[in-house]
Each structure stands twice: as C-alpha cells, then as structure tokens.
Image: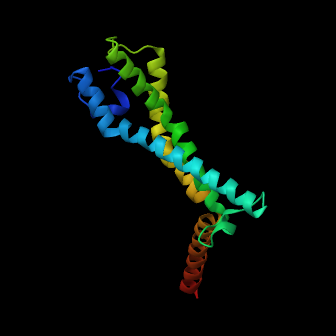
Amino acid sequence: DLSISSGPWCWIRGCLKNMEIVKWMTITGKGWEIATYIVTAFLYIYLKYYMIKRRRREHAPDLRYSQISMHLRDDDENYVLLWFVLYLLRIWGTARYGIFVFRVIHGKDVYNFDETDMVLMHLQSIGDSAQAFCNCLLFCVKDTTVRRGIWRNLCWRERDRQLRDYNQIH
C-alpha cells in the first residue's frame, strides 16, 4: 500500500492502526534488532577492553587471539567484525522504523513516501539481503581454515573424478 510500513515489513497488515503497526514492527523485528545492537556493542567494547588490558599486562602490543587461549585461532579476530557488518547493513531499516515511529507519535502522514523513504526502503532491502552474503565472506572466504577446507574438497572431488574416469577407460 506504499505506506512506510510496507516493503520489507510486508507481513504487517496495512489496515491496522498506526500504533498497532508500530507494536508489531517492534515485536517481530526491530525491537530484537535494537537489542542486538546494544548487546553486540557491549560485547565488542568489553572484548576490546579485555584485549587492551591483556596487551598492557603482558607488554605485548601485537598480542594475537591464539596467544590468549589455545581454543582461539588468529582468524577468530575476523568474527569481531560481525557487529560492524550488522550495523552497516541493517541501520537503514532501523532509520525507517525511527522515522515511522516519529511520524506516528507526531500525527504526521505515514502513507505517502517521499524521496528519503524510498531511498531508505531500497537500502533496507539491499542490506537485509546482503547480511547473509557478508557473513559468508567473513566465515568462509576470510577464514583460512574454512577456505583451505573448501579448496581441498573441491580439488579432491576433481581428482576423484579423474581417477574414476581413468579406471573406466583402463
């Protein structure tokens, strides 16, 4: 219906009252997402504080994750970037949500898109979909162990196929 609550929030009926739409947008997504923003920011700050404290205590400015615990690998530091990916890709929908709530509270029109709404809706649609792709990049492409495992499996399959073809001929 081209209201600000349409698009990526298509499961919420447009015929509901505006406060009902805000309630369902909060319960079914944005409330959890904002809580995730807060929790991940806290965990990131805590982890950075811990790393700085540990580096100062051990007088090791280039202390690596694998030196902190034998259960960590150096590539695990990439996973600290997940919060940044989450923020960067999902902030557009949170901005649209904030604009919608502001318009509802102040009794402004929520059924007509302006250019800002349209741009934010497209960025939200791209960002929501791109989150899985960026997680794949961090977990599969940037992680040396996983990348080597994928490459090894691809190479072994090719070698197995060549061996099978050779055995069928001879």
Report the residue at 61% width, 67% height from top. Answer: 72
**Foreground: 99 or 129?**
99
Residue 10 in view of the camera = no
Report the residue at 71% width, 62% height from top. Answer: 64
Whether residue 102 is situated above or below residue 75 in the rendered picture: above
Q: Outermost residue, bottom direction?
A: 170
Quadrant of the rendered structure where residue 68 is?
Answer: bottom right
Whether residue 45 is situated above or below residue 139 in the rendered picture: above
Q: Answer left or right for 19 relative to 44.
A: left
Q: Report the quarter where the C terminus lies.
A: bottom right
Report the residue at 43% width, 13% height from top. Answer: 114
Quadrant of the rendered structure where residue 14 is?
Answer: top left
Residue 33 position in % (x across, y down): 41, 40
Residue 36 position in % (x across, y down): 44, 44
Residue 17 in view of the camera = yes
Q: Answer left or right for 31 relative to 11.
A: right
How many numbered discs, if any? 0
Q: Outermost residue, front direction?
A: 57
Whether residue 7 is situated above or below residue 164 in the rendered picture: above
Q: Answer left or right for 75 relative to 60.
A: left
Report the residue at 78% width, 57% height from top. Answer: 61
Q: Report the quarter where the N terminus lies.
A: top left
**Foreground: 22 or 157?**
22
